[in-house]
Image: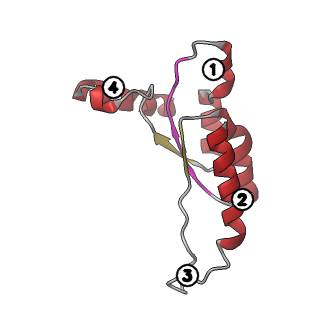
Amino acid sequence: MKRITIAIALLLFMLPFSYALPPADTTRPPIVILSFDDAEISHYTVVAPMLKKYHCNATFFVCDFPRKTPADSVEFMNWQQIQRLHQMGFEIGNHTGHHKNVTKLTRGQLQQEIQYVDDKCSS
């Protein structure tokens, strides 16, 4: 929760100033890229509504954390919530299936992790 609080504070700090600075190319507005990862529930309950309020877009890199305890079920988004983010117009990025250390996976295991999220998003 601390990471998301910092991210929100930074976002709120930056929004009023994002249009105050003159862009290097005066024919185009400045570009800010926002991304969020790990499919934390606060991305769905707090961040997405705030981004919509300020007409901002973002990419949410999602994975499927194993739900070992009831607390895990409320800490991370489920696939219906991820689908709703997509329906709201946000981009969904692939953060591998189960947030494994990709440097320790074989090529085949890595392909399975990537395919897992692709399959979930397709369905």
Q: Residue furthest right?
A: 53
Q: Residue at x 65, y 48 (%)?
A: 6
Q: Which of pointers 3 and 2 lies earlier in the amino acid sequence?
A: 2
Q: Which of pointers 2 and 4 lies earlier in the amino acid sequence?
A: 2
SS at mark 3? loop
Q: Which residue is mark 3?
A: 23
Q: Position of residue 115 (x, y in %)?
A: 37, 30
Q: Are marks 1 and 3 in contact (CB under 8 Å)?
A: no
In this view of the protein, which residue sits in the foreground, 80 or 22? 22
Q: Which of pointers 4 and 1 lies earlier in the amino acid sequence?
A: 1
Mark 1 closeness class: few <14, some 14–19, many ≥20 residues within 10 Å: some
Q: Which residue is mark 4?
A: 112
Q: Position of residue 100 (x, y in %)?
A: 40, 26
Q: Which residue is mark 1?
A: 72
Q: Residue at x 66, y 33 (%)?
A: 41
Q: Are marks 4 and 1 in contact (CB under 8 Å)?
A: no
Identify residue type, mark 2: Leu
Q: Which residue is mark 2?
A: 12
